[in-house]
Amino acid sequence: MSLTRRTLLASSAAALAAPALAQTQGKVVVIGGGFGGASAARFLHKMGFDVTLIEPNAQYISCPFSNAVIAGLRDLSQQTFTYAALERQGIRLVRQMASKIDNSVRRVTLADGVMISYDRLVLAPGIDLNFEALPGYDEAASNLMPHAWKAGAQTLLLRQQLEAMSDGGTVIISAPANPFRCPPGPYERASLIAWYLKNHKPKSKLLILDAKDAFSKQSLFTAAWKEIYGDRVEWIGLSGGGKVTEVKAKEKIFITEFGEHKADVGNVIPPQRAGKIAISAGVADQTGWCPIDPVTFEAKLAPNIHVIGDACVGGGMPKSAFSANAQAKACAQAVAALLRGDAPTEPKLVNTCYSLVKPDYGISVAGVYAPARGLLADVQGAGGVSAANASASVRAAEAQYAEGWYKTITQEVFG
Amino acid sequence: MALLFCLCGPALADPLDVSQSPPGASACLGCHGATETELPSLKNLSAVEIEAGMDAFRTGAREATLMNRIAKGFTPEETRAIAQWLATQGRAK
Ligand SMILES: Cc1cc2nc3c(=O)[nH]c(=O)nc-3n(C[C@H](O)[C@H](O)[C@H](O)COP(=O)(O)OP(=O)(O)OC[C@H]3O[C@@H](n4cnc5c(N)ncnc54)[C@H](O)[C@@H]3O)c2cc1C
């Protein structure tokens, strides 16, 4: 009897000890399986936490390098990833949309009504395109004038429209005011479309209508456009009348404060905000983005909810896949410390965004960030853009490094 | 051969445990990761060599397309901690 009891006690002690080793106390739910959420899930699971990842799509189609798909330089399959490696790792995948967060009882409700509770929630829903912000541009209009700002069918639609356009046509891209996903993205896109036009439709032109007067890597892009594309590329900024105030999707007309521009192919990159679930959960402020504590990524408006990636207010950090992944790792470290009852340590973060001006011509912008004044602030003296007068071989090296970055990051995030 | 595969397989597929990583170290992994790519690998460098490389990037003694802009964001002490952590994780020699 006593022996049995001792054995039982011993084995239950072992049973208690064993999961403690394999699985640290604490249930983490991650919403969104993009660069931010999938990274957070993998790193938290690796630290021994019980991790559930909520993501409605079986495949993730990545935006970085999707501008090369539009220009016919790359296949969409190179942008497509699955969650098989995450499942193999032991992460619980729930293929549903999260429809509601009840933070007072720490519970997420899924589209099918199932509820999942958490100790801490990591929210990484990315962006929603704001189809209410630009008159004439709603979801139906995006089938005529694609945004291609979420990769997939929209990317292919823009590519098909370019391919169908006759030589001598005008392509117009409209770029939004800050902040938005991927600050250099519209200009990389303009570059690679110009490359396509130069090689396939040399009498055609490209016009960028911009809601701002300055943009990421501007001097590098502008110099390269002049050198490579001559006057094929034209950019009109805010003060030149570049702000688009309305579109007529059927006619492919962009209306600005100064007049009208008719396109043969029109690409509207509309204003954006944090993914809907962040807004409905009350984690976003009136700007549409989620303010966070720069040490823990905990939402300023909701304790226990950590926001990473495009949805958060990243301070100096741009909304990029690199940032989302770097933030995920720093956030995972903080969440682990909090769940273990330790004090989180101050992180340091890095971002680098490569852009292609043509296939063998890469440029980059980088930054190093640390918490300061309640934000993730630029570390002074670090960061900046590629050298202005670099040689062709340096540009070619950066184009190669861009490929290397994409392979490294997608391996880390999706296996 | 099969054994080698078993040893390398999980190490390649699994992310690192970053819970004890010093500030900034996990961001290096975004470019210097588990796979061989167009980017230089740190795998065959010792912690001392990584630190020396970062110091040279920081001062400008070594030319770079990018690393000088990143190295300037880290103090010598922070750099040393990062280099040593990368080595303990098998991402450096
Ligand atoms: C053309 C283009 C080029 C780019 N190029 C680069 C580049 O070169 N380098 C770079 O670093 N970045 C680049 N980016 C930016 C990059 O794509 C984003 O910054 C990055 O995807 C942000 O990651 P995230 O995890 O925050 O969001 P996402 O990657 O968008 O992931 C969000 C995920 O959440 C899911 N989700 C949303 N709501 C819910 C819900 N309610 N329930 C469950 N799941 C939900 C979505 O299905 C999605 O899978 C580019 C972007 C564009 C548009």
Image (cartoon, rainbow, N blue to C red):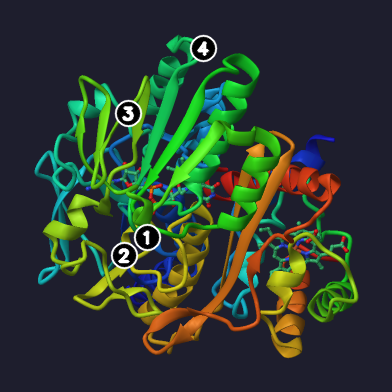
What is the C-alpha distance between the residues marked 2 and 3? 40 Å
Q: Which amino acid does label 3 sit on?
A: Pro
Mark 4 Cβ inside 8 Å of ligand 1:
no
Mark 3 and mark 4, same subunit? yes
Q: Which amino acid does label 2 sit on?
A: Lys
Q: Badge 2 is on which residue?
A: A27
Q: What secondary structure is marked by label 2? A: strand
Mark 2 and mark 4, same subunit? yes
Q: Residues within 10 Å of mark 2 (few under 14, many from 20)?
A: some
Mark 1 Cβ inside 8 Å of ligand 1:
no
What is the C-alpha distance between the residues marked 3 and 4? 20 Å
Q: Residue A7 appears in which quarter of the rendering?
A: bottom left
What is the C-alpha distance between the residues marked 1 and 2? 5 Å
Residue A194's place in the image compared with A52, above or below, is above
**Label 2: chain?**
A
Residue B10 position, x and y percent, is: 65, 47
Q: Badge 4 is on which residue?
A: A167
What is the C-alpha distance between the residues marked 2 and 4? 57 Å
Task: Name which residue lies at 70% across and 71% down.
Answer: B69
Residue A384 position, x and y percent, is: 63, 68
Of labels 3 and 1, earlier in sequence is 1
Of labels 3 and 4, earlier in sequence is 3
Q: What residue type is labelled 4?
A: Asp
Q: Do the residues labelled 2 and 4 touch (CB within 8 Å)?
A: no
